[in-house]
Image (cartoon, helix red, strand yellow):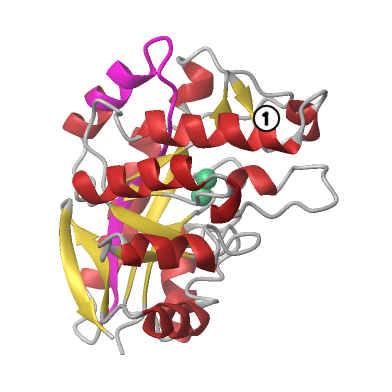
Amino acid sequence: MIRSDTHVHSRQSHDGKLPIKELTRLAKQRRVDYFCTTEHCDFDLQYGRCRSPYKWKFLDIDKYYEEWKAAKSELDNDKNNTLTLCFGIEAGFSAKGTASEKYAEVIAKYPFDVVINSVHCVDGREAYFRSFFLFKSKCHAYGDYLNAVLASLDAPYPYDIVAHIGYIVHGAPYRDKALRYADFPDKFDAILKGIIARDKALEINFHHDMAPGRDIVERYYRLGGRKVCYGGDSHRGEICEHFEQFVSLIKEIGFDCYYIFKQHEAIRVEL
Ligand SMILES: [Zn+2]
Ligand SMILES: [Zn+2]
């Protein structure tokens, strides 16, 4: 079976560790057929009036593109190569400020294969950190997060994948942290129907725990959603680390394929 990962970070992301050529070397070792570097593009924090308790270096897209092209041409010059390397970004959504205009600009300028639409900030604050949850009940914090995911579907720039629904769970201080379909059925239905109506792909992300959870992926399938993709979201070269888990999950639910992207075109991969 073709093994693919549409969500990978290199050292070009502030929290990624490895050069892209090192990622291609590891990917070959791991029998990966396709992967896409999707570096953090945090215009939500840079231009979108969102705040984070930590400051980090923003992506230099020109530098990223140069490093990516060098890794790509090394693969192209190897006549025995079977690995496909694609070029993408993970775009942190903010409806405020000029984040959307900036995304539209860079997406038009660079030949991206994949744009991942991610919600990291909720009501103007990065939700990865405990400080986000101060004085908020689980219902309040998670409800606000799902509203932000729903709003992100209307991002006024081209995107392909809706990432890690459940990102909010990571930093949550609650004893029972799980984000369940049954607790927010109307919000989830609006999001899942929105993804289907816009013909976007739902990512199943394996960075922390699986996000979204099985109950949500099952609901997506029941509503008619068929476009899923594997997002390892690795930062240290663990490309396709949970791919087998992904395949058995989606097969059990009923999917007969998953998707990868080239030049924003969704390509069906049979299971
Ligand atoms: Zn993310
Ligand atoms: Zn990521």
Q: Is mark 1 within 8 Å of ligand 1?
A: no
As drawn, is 131 to the left or to the right of 212? right
Instruction: Name above or below for residue 91 compared with residue 181.
Output: above
Snapshot quadrant of residue 174: top right
As drawn, is 248 to the left or to the right of 16? left
* Residue occupying image coordinates x 70% and y 48%: 170
**Residue 54 in the image: x percent, y percent?**
72, 27
Instruction: Name above or below for residue 173 compared with residue 254.
Output: above
Report the magenta residues as a range. 82-104
Quadrant of the image containing the C terminus: bottom left
Secondary element at image label 1 = helix
Quadrant of the image containing the N terminus: bottom left
Instruction: Name above or below for residue 23 compared with residue 138.
Output: below
Q: Nearer the viewer, residue 91 or 14?
A: 91
* Residue occupying image coordinates x 24% and y 51%: 196
Residue 63 drawn in magenta: no
Snapshot quadrant of residue 251: bottom left
Q: Nearer the viewer, residue 241 or 210?
A: 210
Q: Nearer the viewer, residue 192 or 184?
A: 184
Callout count: 1
Instruction: Name above or below for residue 14 compared with residue 267.
Output: above
**Residue 270 in the image: x percent, y percent?**
22, 83
Residue at mark 1: 140
* Residue occupying image coordinates x 67% and y 24%: 52
**Residue 28 in the image: x percent, y percent?**
41, 81
* Residue occupying image coordinates x 68% and y 25%: 55
Q: Amino acid at mark 1?
A: His
Q: Residues within 10 Å of mark 1 (few under 14, many from 20)?
A: few
Residue 101 drawn in magenta: yes
**Residue 69 in the image: x percent, y percent?**
28, 53
